[in-house]
Amino acid sequence: MDDASVQQVRRFNRSVTQRVGALDDRYLARDRPLGEARLLWEIGPGGCEVRALRTRLGLDSGHASRLLRALERDGLVEVVAGARDGRVRTARLTTAGRAERALLDERSDELARAFLAPLSARQRERLVGAMGEVERLLTAALVELGPADPAEPDARFCIRSYFDELDRRSESGFDPAAGIQLDPRELRPPAGVLLLARLRAEPIGCGAVRLHGDGPAEIRRMWVAEAARGLGVGRRLLGELEAWAVARGARVARLETNRALAEAISLYRSSGYREVAAFNDEPFADHWFEKRLDGTDARR
Amino acid sequence: MDDASVQQVRRFNRSVTQRVGALDDRYLARDRPLGEARLLWEIGPGGCEVRALRTRLGLDSGHASRLLRALERDGLVEVVAGARDGRVRTARLTTAGRAERALLDERSDELARAFLAPLSARQRERLVGAMGEVERLLTAALVELGPADPAEPDARFCIRSYFDELDRRSESGFDPAAGIQLDPRELRPPAGVLLLARLRAEPIGCGAVRLHGDGPAEIRRMWVAEAARGLGVGRRLLGELEAWAVARGARVARLETNRALAEAISLYRSSGYREVAAFNDEPFADHWFEKRLDGTDARR
DNA sequence: TCCATTCTCTGACTCTAGTCAGAGAATCGC
DNA sequence: GCGATTCTCTGACTAGAGTCAGAGAATGGA
């Protein structure tokens, strides 16, 4: 990471972020406290649990409560107790609230148009492209990887999503009970590890590795949510799993996959995996891959 | 300006600006009110007039004064009366203030590194490139054009800078008194107009046009500050000058220029100007250009 | 069933940002 | 020289953001 890059990022943070951000806030909150406007926005057309609003906006519970009361007083929002869990309350926009939110939308559009107006068609095109790129890559940078217990809700959500996707995409369909079984304990240290990828606390991907003593470590459960693809999350997960295994003595990694998972296969190939003969009899697998982890293969 | 572009800009404004901005602020102001930190930063290593600080940060005079007092109390800043004008005071960082500012710098770098760290080398490169592009084009979008009186200080600054540059860059040097003279009154409506380009209230370019009854309008004094080149300011100025002249009946625009001004010449060519025989005997000119403004030429 | 936990709300705060009016000193233009 | 203007500072505010402690209701697990 060279100094020039750091300087550019910093300059961006200061100049773009502060100037544009301040303008955006002023537009958004013309006749309403900024906090309320943001909350109104964040509730969204479909409503939202109060708890989720708090974590997403990083609000203190007291503060959030007061903001919601203010919006309720203005008739923009109604907060109702959840059906399933009486403690969790859900905020919903009223008709007036939806209108108000549409107004905020319109103001944001106005500001966006003000940015584009002085530019030539070519400049606009480049600006829009570069903004998309910055947004995408900063999102990628915000993805955090970390170990998780296979039993915890987020982990179970990811694994379930992985199974669902296998079932949806493979020709034959996928039945978790049919192939080689994997006991959750095998994915807990020291036998193995499950890593989750999260974006703003939401789980968006997973990957696991299981050690086999002196033998090859086994990569399993590699999955990335559709919305988070193209951010390099899969590659990061794979890299960290390999590093984890290497640190515990593994010298080779292995994995198998179904032919329907084209992106996964190309990820494995470009990460240095080479196709090998079937090393197990998993009925669902079409391809078996292997990679030396001790540096005798280029890591790319 | 299509809807998709507006949506992208808006999404950028919300997601990037708010998230990064909030992070940046928190890093910057870890143990000090944000306002003070910003002020400390803005004063810069060389000191700064209080008046300039106020306008740049958009602070109320009372507020600015109080912030400066607080920084003074902490021994980070000293505010001294100006030598030339006793009303204007200048804020200067003390040694402790410079150290504190360096610390802010360091924190900004830290944040920048945190953004880059999770990314691959290729992703970093693209992010940095895109950030530079966004910064550049948003700067371009913030440039405002407007008419100005040739006698006002900003206008005189631009024209002086233009002469200086001609003198510096042309082989022969330039003497404003030697060539065809231009009375400032000829650049005031209705005879003509002088447009200034400003970026955050600072003058960064100029351009003028003078009408000649039924004859060709004359483009003069086209200049853009070095720091603001590559933003399309020259092209915008030229376009507005042409539009102004067209609205007042001109059908042809003319201009002459020195061969040393290569960017200007290529701007004229790509804006639809064609080289013609000398139409005056300005000794300093090497090229004479002309463009039909009534639409019989393509405008590009 | 009971106790710990979770979620939400209220009350009582602190701090920062920002506004407005007015006063005093320096300077400018006539 | 004198009045208008400019620049800065102080005092007296308001409002919004955010924190902390504690209470009450709902829930989950032993």
Image: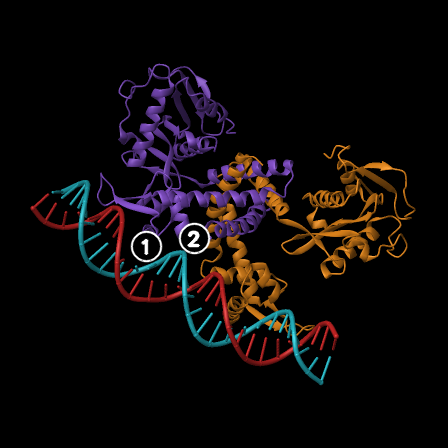
Chain colours: A purple, B orange, C red, D cyan
For residue A34, the mark is 2
Relative depth, front residue between D10 and A44: A44
A52 to A226, vertically: above or below: below
Q: Quadrant of residue B124?
A: top right
Q: Name the residue located 53 percent from the left edge and 66 percent from the top edge.
A: B64
Q: Quadrant of residue A245?
A: top left
Quadrant of the drawing holding the N terminus of chain B: top right
- Residue C6 in percent (x, y) is at 25, 46
Mark 1: secondary structure: helix
Mark 2 closeness class: few <14, some 14–19, many ≥20 residues within 10 Å: some
**Residue type at mark 1?**
Arg
The residue identified by callout 1 is A66
For residue A91, the mark is none
Q: Name the residue located 64 percent from the left edge and 56 percent from the top edge.
A: B201
* Labels 1 and 2 in the same subunit: yes
Chain assignment, label 2:
A
Q: Quadrant of residue B259?
A: top right
Relative depth, front residue between A191 and A264: A264
A144 to B107, vertically: above or below: above
Chain assignment, label 1:
A
The answer to whether residue A118 is visible is yes
B106 to A246, vertically: above or below: below
Relative depth, front residue between A92 and B186: B186
Mark 2: secondary structure: helix
**Residue type at mark 2?**
Leu
